[in-house]
Image (cartoon, rainbow, N blue to C red):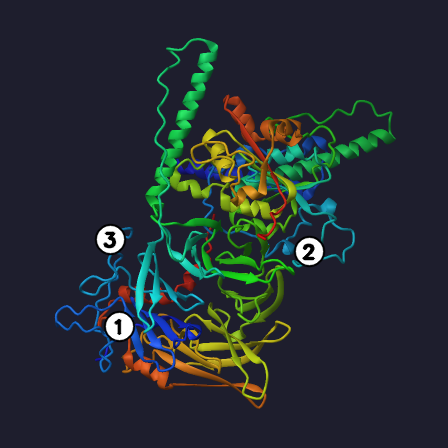
């Protein structure tokens, strides 16, 4: 019986035409990151490199073009014993300190890939070589679970929004880090009230005591703080909510005439807030609050072609369209009656050229709902309102989307394990090859938006290559753990209880 | 033991119901308007600010029903309705007491700023219930006093109309015997978790004063993130305060005072002062520490220091009071 393979959790296109290199598709599945030729679907590399222990074959999986399926791998479900310790990317038996890679980002210059490995809360930065291989440059373990990452408009800084509501900034390429030294403890005053008698001396003694105590307290507080957050790399807390963050966007708007573009950071949380702060180094200046959702917010999206527009979605069955720099709600778009309970799991902006002869481009907003095979299609009209264009039905739950070219081709990663429309019901059998990805082709015909769904050579090649396999037998608890790595938004809904 | 507790609870509920009824009836003469007693509203001094609770909060400031809180300030034009479908006020709320406790500060400030709308926010249900009962009783008493005064002036002949006897041992602040400016119509209390939902109640640059009086010190280091003052929250206070607005803090815990200074970037971790002209950037951009002379001249500081329940307790115990007040500066220029 064929075993299940890990679906692609994250899918990103790396645009490298400016470097004179072919584009690359980067995808994470299970504990691995894969790279594919964006045109061919041919697998280029896997990270971490799978080490073949027993067979003595030293060839990397990338060089064996006829057998691209990686060896079966035992996944590790227990959390690593020691998160803070730096570990080699993969041990000899191929097991890693993490079981999944929820977030993958690429820099706009196409040179670097940023990935978050889940259990060790580690932000890893890779350079992408010319032939599409990953070279790990740094790994930084965060203290709290990162929930969303983004890169600043200059591409030099990573923003990490975490479960505790804080946003940290980290340089993309960490430099020399000198730990701020803890001040040596000040000596306590030796004199006591029994040894000093004059009024003035008594007063100064009192002050000395106060100072010593304060210094000690400060040092202790710092130590205690450090025990937990001893991060041995440069990082800075730039803003915070008192609520779990679910998404973060760094964006730039053109400034007034003759001035520099203005940078902003948008943060969304579980308590229905979207905050608009200034960019670094003024992230403590809050410019706006976009308030209007009535349940958790799970995704926010600023379309690349309309930077003044924000589209947000979550658990309240609607999309909200904002003029975010003014904090103005522009439009409320209900998701539709049948899908009221679903939580938005992804909002993607897709832009493609109109067919030859006609000018302009088509600007689409695609919306995925957690644990459903539907993809809601909207066009963003010239007045910045959403117009529903229908629902695309895929063959499995939609996980992530990457826009492949300017002709309307979109690669969609699908859940291969669970039944369509379910977050926890596993399929009876795994078919081979599994439909890890599907291709969605948009076009304009008879003045309307049309699409076709299916396999093309690219997705066929990706699917044939497969990903790492899950163990054949898993108990219910293990299955639930695996389900939760992909579908966890439901847990963010508020539970009611008595005070 | 259990029956005793149950009896106590029953007693409490009975008492609160009576107080509630009094407020709803809205009548009575000066002698039988009862001020609520704190002992029926006690609740443990801490609340988990990170859990969800059953909180009621508006979607946005434009959805907030203020009309039911300040009936005397409702806009006479009934067609003026906010996004929540409730009547608008003639003015905005401008003063907030975060963690108002039993409401001593509000009651003390009410006659001082009779034309300013003030709200106390408190996360503990029972304590807030006390504040609400206290304010409605004070308002009621004012109405009665006004009626008596009116009768007196029309009928000068009526001899000694004795003022209501001060029968309530529990209540220290707030006049129940004389008419005060504003008649306590300008204060109210709301149950809220301000650490999460402050921007749901107040818009950009809406407030002129925020008070944080004797906040829960959360002594343990791992509880520090629950403190009501932090750099991240100070950014949020700056958002709702208008430039020139004031952020008042007072604590009896010296370490917390330094924590406050540190989180406004007026002190370093080592306890060193940060000089005024030292370029620190960060949250310091937005705040200016008031001098001792300025504190001396501000009557609100006096109320904060001596009229809140907590400040009286500290005075009784000969404790210290550490005051720090910060003025909200205008937003810094965008980086050129």
Dots 2 and 1: beta carbons under 8 Å? no
**Which of pointers 2 and 1 indicates the residue nearer the eye?**
1
Q: Chain of mark 2?
A: B
Disc 3 marks which residue? A81
Q: Farthest residue in the top direction? A: A198
Which picture quadrant has residue B48? top left
Q: Chain of mark 1?
A: A
Give the residue at x 72% y 47%.
B91
- Residue density around tag 1, few if under 14, some if 14–19, many if 20 or more, within 10 Å: many
- Label 3: state its secondary structure: loop
Q: Earlier in the sequence, mark 3 or mark 1?
A: 3
- Label 2: state its secondary structure: loop
Q: Is residue B208 placed above or below A493 in the rendered structure? A: above
Rounded to the nearest angstrom, the CA distance separating label 2 from label 3 is: 56 Å
Rounded to the nearest angstrom, the CA distance separating label 3 from label 1 is: 24 Å
**Which of pointers 2 and 3 indicates the residue nearer the eye?**
3
Q: Nearer the viewer, residue B304 or B262?
A: B262
Residue A468's mark?
Answer: 1
Residue A283 visible to an observer of this rendering = yes
Q: Farthest residue in the bottom direction? A: A446
Give the x, y percent position of residue B157: 87, 25
Rounded to the nearest angstrom, the CA distance separating label 2 from label 1 is: 58 Å
Q: Nearer the viewer, residue B336 or A382?
A: B336
Residue B86's mark?
Answer: 2
Q: Is residue A388 placed above or below A226 in the rendered structure? A: below
Give the x, y percent position of residue A220: 36, 34
Dots 3 and 1: beta carbons under 8 Å? no
Q: Is residue A485 placed above or below A24 in the rendered structure? A: above
Q: Nearer the viewer, residue A466 or B8?
A: A466
Give the x, y percent position of residue A331: 61, 68
- Residue density around tag 2, few if under 14, some if 14–19, many if 20 or more, within 10 Å: some
Q: Is residue B17 placed above or below A308 in the rendered structure? A: above
């Amino acid at each position: 019986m064929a075993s299940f393979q890990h679906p692609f959790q994250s899918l990103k296109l790396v645009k490298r035409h400016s470097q004179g290199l072919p584009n690359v598709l980067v995808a994470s599945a299970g504990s691995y990151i894969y790279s594919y030729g964006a045109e061919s679907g041919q697998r280029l590399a896997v990270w971490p490199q799978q080490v073949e222990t027993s067979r003595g074959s030293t060839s990397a999986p990338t060089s064996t073009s006829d057998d691209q399926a990686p060896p079966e791998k035992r996944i590790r479900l227990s959390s690593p014993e020691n998160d803070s310790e730096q570990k080699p990317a993969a041990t000899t038996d191929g097991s890693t300190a993490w079981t999944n890679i929820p977030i993958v980002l690429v820099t706009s210059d196409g040179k670097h890939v940023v990935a978050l490995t889940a259990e060790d809360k580690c932000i890893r930065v890779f350079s992408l070589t010319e032939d599409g291989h990953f070279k790990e440059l740094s790994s930084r373990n965060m203290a709290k679970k990162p929930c969303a990452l983004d890169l600043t408009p200059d591409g030099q800084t990573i923003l990490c929004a975490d479960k505790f509501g804080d946003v940290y900034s980290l340089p993309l390429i960490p430099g020399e880090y000198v730990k701020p030294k803890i001040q040596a403890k000040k000596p306590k005053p030796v004199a006591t009230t029994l040894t000093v008698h004059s009024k003035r001396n008594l007063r100064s003694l009192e002050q000395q005591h106060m100072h010593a105590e304060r210094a000690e307290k400060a040092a202790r507080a710092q130590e205690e703080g450090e025990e937990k957050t001893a991060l041995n790399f440069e990082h800075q807390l730039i803003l915070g909510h008192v609520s779990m963050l679910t998404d973060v966007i760094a964006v730039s708007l053109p400034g007034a005439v003759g001035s520099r573009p203005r940078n902003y950071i948008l943060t969304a949380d579980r308590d229905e807030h979207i905050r608009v702060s200034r960019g670094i180094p003024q992230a403590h200046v809050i410019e706006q609050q976009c308030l209007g959702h009535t349940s958790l917010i799970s995704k926010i999206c600023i379309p690349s072609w309309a930077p003044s527009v924000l589209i947000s979605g979550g658990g309240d069955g609607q999309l909200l369209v904002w003029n975010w720099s003014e904090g103005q709600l522009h439009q409320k778009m209900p998701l539709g009656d049948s899908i009221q309970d679903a939580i938005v799991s992804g909002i993607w902006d897709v832009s493609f050229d109109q067919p030859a002869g006609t000018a302009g481009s088509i600007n689409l907003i695609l919306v995925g709902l957690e644990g459903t095979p539907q993809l809601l299609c909207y066009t963003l009209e010239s007045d910045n309102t959403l117009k529903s264009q229908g629902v695309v039905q895929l063959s499995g739950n939609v996980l992530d989307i990457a826009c492949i070219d300017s002709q309307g081709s979109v690669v969609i990663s699908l859940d291969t394990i669970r039944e369509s429309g379910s977050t926890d019901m596993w399929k009876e059998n795994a078919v081979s090859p599994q439909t890890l990805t599907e291709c969605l082709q948009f076009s304009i015909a008879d003045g309307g938006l049309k699409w076709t769904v299916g396999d093309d050579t690219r997705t066929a090649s990706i699917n044939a290559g497969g990903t790492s396999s899950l163990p054949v037998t898993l108990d219910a608890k293990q299955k639930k753990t695996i389900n939760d790595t992909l579908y966890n938004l439901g847990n963010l809904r508020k539970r009611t209880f008595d005070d | 033991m259990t029956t005793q507790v149950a009896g106590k609870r029953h007693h409490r509920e009975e008492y609160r119901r009576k107080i509630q009824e009094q407020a709803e009836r809205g009548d009575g003469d000066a002698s039988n308007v009862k001020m609520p007693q704190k002992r029926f509203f006690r609740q443990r001094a801490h609340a988990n600010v990170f859990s969800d609770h059953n909180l009621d909060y508006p979607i946005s400031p434009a959805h907030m029903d203020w009309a039911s809180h300040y009936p005397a300030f409702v806009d006479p034009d009934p067609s003026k309705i906010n996004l929540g479908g409730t009547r608008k006020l003639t003015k905005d709320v401008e003063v907030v007491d975060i963690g108002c406790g039993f409401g001593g500060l509000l009651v003390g400030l009410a006659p001082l700023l009779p034309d300013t709308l003030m709200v106390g926010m408190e996360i503990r249900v029972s304590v807030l219930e006390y504040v609400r009962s206290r304010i409605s009783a004070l308002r009621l008493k004012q109405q009665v006093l006004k009626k008596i005064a009116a009768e007196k002036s029309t009928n000068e002949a009526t001899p000694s109309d004795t003022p209501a006897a001060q029968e309530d041992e529990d209540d220290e602040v707030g006049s129940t015997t004389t008419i005060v400016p504003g008649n306590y119509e300008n204060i109210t209390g709301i149950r809220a978790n301000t650490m999460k939902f402050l921007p749901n109640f107040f818009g950009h640059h809406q407030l002129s004063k925020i008070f944080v009086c004797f906040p829960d010190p959360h002594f343990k280091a791992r509880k520090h993130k629950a403190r009501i003052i932090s750099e991240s929250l100070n950014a949020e206070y700056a958002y709702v305060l208008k430039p020139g607005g004031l952020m008042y803090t007072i604590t009896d815990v010296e370490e917390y005072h330094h924590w406050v200074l540190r989180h406004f970037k007026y002190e370093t971790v080592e306890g060193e002062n940060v000089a005024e002209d030292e370029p620190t950037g960060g949250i310091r951009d937005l705040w200016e520490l008031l001098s001792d002379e300025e504190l001396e001249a501000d009557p609100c500081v006096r109320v904060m220091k001596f009229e809140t329940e907590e400040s009286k307790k500290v005075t009784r115990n000969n404790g210290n009071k550490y005051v720090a007040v910060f003025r909200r500066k205008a937003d810094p220029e965008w980086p050129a």
